[in-house]
Structure formats: C-alpha cells, structure tokens
Image (tube, rainbow, N blue to C red):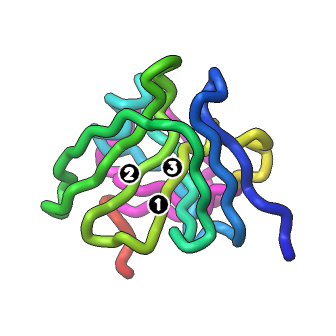
Amino acid sequence: MNKPYIGGCACGAIRYSIAGEPLFSNHCQCRDCQRESGSGHGSYATFARAGVTVTGEAKQWDMVGDSGNVKTRAFCSVCGLPVYMTFAAMPDIFTIRAASLDEPARYKPQAVTYAARGHDWDQFDPNLPKFETMPPT
C-alpha cells in the first residue's frame, strides 16, 4: 500500500488522511479560487472520497461554480485555513488544498484550469497543459 497523504489546517484542529493517489491535481485560476486564496490561483489535489478520513470540525460554505453545481469549501474556524472542497454533483470525490499537505512536495500538478481567467503575473511551468475552463471529462 502506498503512503497516505496526510495534512490539515495550520493550527491542527482539522486533520485528514487519504489512502490512494490523486485522481487529478491542478492549479485553478478561476475567480472563486483567486478570491479564496488571496492570490492568482488555488492548487488542488482530488482523490476518491472512499479513502478519506477527516478529524475535527470544519466550517463550510457553499457556492455555485460556473457549471451551475454547488461546491462546498471547508476551512478551519480557528486558524481560517482553507483545507478541502466537496462537490454536490460529484459526491465520490474529495479535493484538498495542496498547501494543507504535511508534505507539500508530494503535490504534482497535472494541468492549469480556468487559464482564461489567469493573470500575467501568475505564471506556471510552461509544460503544464492549460485549459480555458475545466478539461473535458
């Protein structure tokens, strides 16, 4: 069995452990991710929900994405760190913020999504595939 992905918030009130490898890892440049991160993008790794264990209470808020589907963002009510997201239309997946990993070097981005909303000052590895919105499934 592979080593689990472990992480959580800055203060330790929320912790997670994830068995399995990411299904998809991306830098997202949509306006929602820009606003939530306070930067030009959010960096995420998405896993199968079945392998996820979370401890601690996350504060959650729902928002509607460009697809019209609800995404729930979860953050620590103590330190404020955004930790994970879930999606009403895709209940079998669980998405973490890459910076919430205890070993963030394990994060390996595969693509840039919503590149159409990116800023010139927010640049990535030019070898990463870029998608104007989300890639086709």
Instruction: Report how far apart the C-alphas of labels 1 and 2 lie in the structure.
Output: 6 Å
The disc, 1 or 3, on the residue closer to the chain's N-terminal end is 3
Q: Distance between the residues labelled 1 and 3?
A: 10 Å
Residue 120 can be seen, yes or no: no
Whether residue 56 is visible: yes
In the image, taking residue 90 as reference, residue 57 lies left or right, namely right
- Residue under circle 3? 27
Task: Kindly identify which residue carries mark 2.
Answer: 115
Q: How crowded is mark 3: few (under 14 residues within 10 Å), some or many (20 or more)?
A: many
Tell me if residue 79 comes above or below residue 69 in the rendering: above
Q: Considering only vertical position in the picture, is 10 above or below 65?
A: above
In the rendered view of the protein, which quadrant contains the C terminus? bottom left
Q: Is residue 81 magenta?
A: no
Query: Dot 3: what SS?
Result: strand
- The quarter of the picture where residue 12 lies is top right
- Give the labeled residue for mark 1: 130
Snapshot quadrant of residue 18? bottom right
The residue shown at (44%, 33%) is 75
Q: Nearer the viewer, mark 3 or mark 2?
A: 3
| Secondary structure under the numbered disc 1 in the rendered image | loop
**What is the x, y in percent for residue 16?**
63, 48
Residues in magenta, as a range: 108-131
Residue sitting nearer the eye, 30 or 79: 79
Quadrant, the N terminus = bottom right
Predominant SS along the magenta part: loop
Label 2 near label 1: C-beta < 8 Å?
A: yes
> Which residue is rendered at x = 49% and y = 33% of the image?
122
Q: Which element carries disc 2, helix, strand or loop? A: helix
> Residue most toward the left?
68
